[in-house]
Amino acid sequence: MRAGASAPAALQSALRSAPLGAMMPSATLPAAALLGATLLAGCGFHLEGRTPLPRPLSMTYVETQDPQTDFVQDLRKALIIAGAQVTDESARATAIIHVLQDSVTPRVLAVSPANLPREYEITYTVRFSVTAGGKDLLPPQEISLSRDYSFDEHVLLAKDNEEAILRGALARDLVGVVMRRLGNL
């Protein structure tokens, strides 16, 4: 220590010039990482898309009128990612997700002076319930999401593609909401 330098100033100078590993012993670093992970798990933190599902949903059947919709396809993928087995036979299932409504509704929001549509709103609505062992785990619930987009008849092909992209994005968002509700059962 220099003559005339105070002890706290010398300590601050040493800390600024020391590498990070020198300040924290090597045994302390894994313990700190373990403590941080424990705190995150304790507060309910989960990586996105990795919502753990309750045991009754381990073997799930998705009952729907149209298995090819964006929502149903994305729901099946999300269930598999979350660790559930999705079966094609309701008799083998421990839980059944009933998709009661799965619809996309376009609506004109604005028109041009020539009475041509200029802006649309697309609404994706899903109504579903969940049963397991003959008991209602989740009563019928309805979820709707909407997005609007502009329309130009001169770029018709691009606007049709934009609507399909929005429809897919809305379906993924709805699946996220449904999966969070399933994870909270």
Image (cartoon, grey):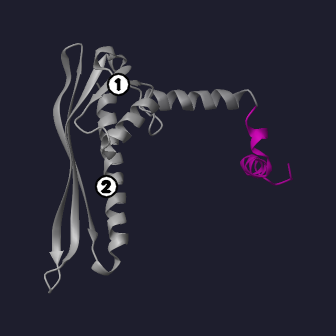
Crowd class of label 2 (few under 14; some 14 to 19; many from 20; radius 10 Å):
many
Is residue 23 within the magenta segment?
yes
Position of the C terminus, as image quadrant, is top left
86 relative position to 112: left or right? right
- Residue 49 in the image: state x and y as whole percent: 44, 38
Image mark count:
2
156 or 118, which lies in front? Answer: 156
Q: Identity of the amino acid at label 1?
A: Asp
46 relative position to 2: left or right? left
Q: Identity of the amino acid at label 2?
A: Arg
122 relative position to 42: left or right? left
135 or 168, which lies in front? Answer: 168
Crowd class of label 1 (few under 14; some 14 to 19; many from 20; radius 10 Å):
few
Disc marking residue 167: 2
Q: Residue at x 78, y 49 (%)?
A: 10
Judging by the rendered image, the residue that carries numbered circle 1 is 88
Front label number (2 vs 1) = 1
Q: Tell me how far mark 2 sits from mark 1, CA to CA.
A: 25 Å
Secondary structure predominantly adopted by residues drawn in magenta: helix
